[in-house]
């Protein structure tokens, strides 16, 4: 589902070059739940952004579901992202002028297939415990409720890959655990490949595989039974 070869990311500051990723390789098969771990500055969020096609590598290649996204034109990449990747941000990234239901519907409407996605949006919101909050705007929702809306939105178009960047980082431990349980439950129900960036070892313990980065390199790759 995801194949990374020789992936590197460098930033030229004008006075020197910062190497964020230094040439890494791995393959993630379909349906696997992978946690990417590492200290702050290890390159894990940069890696996730590259995998999602939100940034361009300095070297190497990335294949998503058989498609080489390295150097792909932005229009084609945007279309591929829209049908292949669901993304959950730490900061939720909900549109404040849209209700919970409208936020969840947005990826479906952007896909433009002409069908009515409201039944699926409502089903997803119900599955994350927000059946009575569909008409509420983000400002009317707690942080945990906003993240649950973001989870529902990520699954709206049934993407084969779901990526999450510290999805519980802005939540207290109790709410974070609820969101994690919902994420795992939805992921199993929808049979997606899940790639999650976290520094939380308790969260990573739920993954079937943990890739650990340090100083831009993969220093451990553990598959769990």
Image: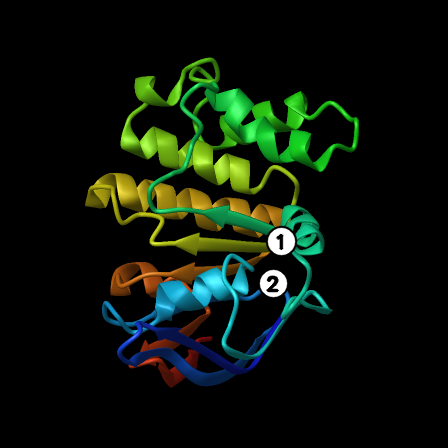
The answer to whether residue 148 is left or right of residue 193 is left
Q: Secondary structure at mark 2?
A: loop
**Please, what secondary structure does the residue beneath circle 1 have?**
loop
Query: Residue 204, percent across and down?
Result: 34, 64
Work out whether 208 lies above or below 217: above
Q: Is residue 222 visible?
A: yes
Q: Position of residue 187 (x, y in %)?
A: 54, 50
Percent of width and height locating residue 38: 29, 72
The residue tagged 2 is 31
Q: Residue at x 55, y 66 (%)?
A: 32
Residue at position x 69%, y 53% from top?
80
**Circle 2/circle 1 CB separation < 8 Å:** yes
State the residue at coordinates (66%, 40%): 157
Q: Looking at the image, can residue 1 be seen?
A: no
- The answer to which of 210 and 135 lies nearer the viewer is 135
Q: How is the image coloured?
A: rainbow
**Which mark, residue 191?**
1
- The spot of residue 82 in percent (x, y) is 65, 46
Whole-Å distance between the Cαs marked 2 and 1?
6 Å
**Few, some or many residues within 10 Å of mark 2 (<14, 14–19, 20+):** some
Lower position in the chain sequence, tag 2 or tag 1: 2
Q: Is residue 87 above or below residue 212?
A: above
Q: Which residue lies most toward the right here?
A: 114
Q: Is residue 157 left or right of residue 167?
A: right
In the rendered image, the quadrant that contains the N terminus is: bottom right
Q: Is residue 135 above or below residue 71?
A: above
Between 22 and 145, which is closer to the camera in this rendering? 22
Q: How many marks?
A: 2
Q: Which mark is residue 217?
A: none
* Label 1 neighbour load within 10 Å: few <14, some 14-19, many 20+: some
């Amino acid at each position: 589902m995801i194949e990374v070869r020789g992936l590197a990311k460098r930033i030229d500051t004008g006075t020197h070059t910062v190497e964020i990723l230094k040439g890494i390789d791995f393959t993630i098969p379909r349906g696997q739940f992978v946690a990417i771990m590492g200290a702050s500055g290890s390159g894990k969020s940069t890696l996730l952004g590259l995998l999602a096609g939100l940034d361009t590598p300095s070297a190497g290649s990335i294949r998503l579901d058989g498609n080489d996204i390295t150097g792909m034109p932005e229009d084609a990449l945007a279309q591929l992202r829209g049908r292949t990747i669901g993304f959950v941000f730490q900061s939720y990234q909900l549109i404040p002028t849209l209700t919970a239901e409208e936020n969840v519907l947005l990826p479906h409407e952007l896909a433009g297939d002409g069908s009515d996605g409201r039944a699926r949006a409502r089903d997803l919101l119900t599955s994350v415990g927000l059946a009575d909050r569909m008409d509420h705007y983000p400002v009317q929702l707690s942080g945990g409720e906003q993240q649950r809306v973001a989870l529902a939105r990520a699954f709206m178009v049934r993407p084969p890959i779901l990526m999450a960047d510290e999805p519980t980082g802005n939540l207290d431990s109790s709410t974070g655990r609820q969101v994690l349980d919902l994420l795992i439950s939805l992921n199993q129900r929808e049979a997606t490949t899940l790639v999650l960036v976290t520094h939380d070892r308790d969260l990573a313990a739920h993954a079937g595989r943990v890739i650990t980065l340090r100083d831009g390199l993969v220093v451990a790759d553990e598959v769990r039974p």
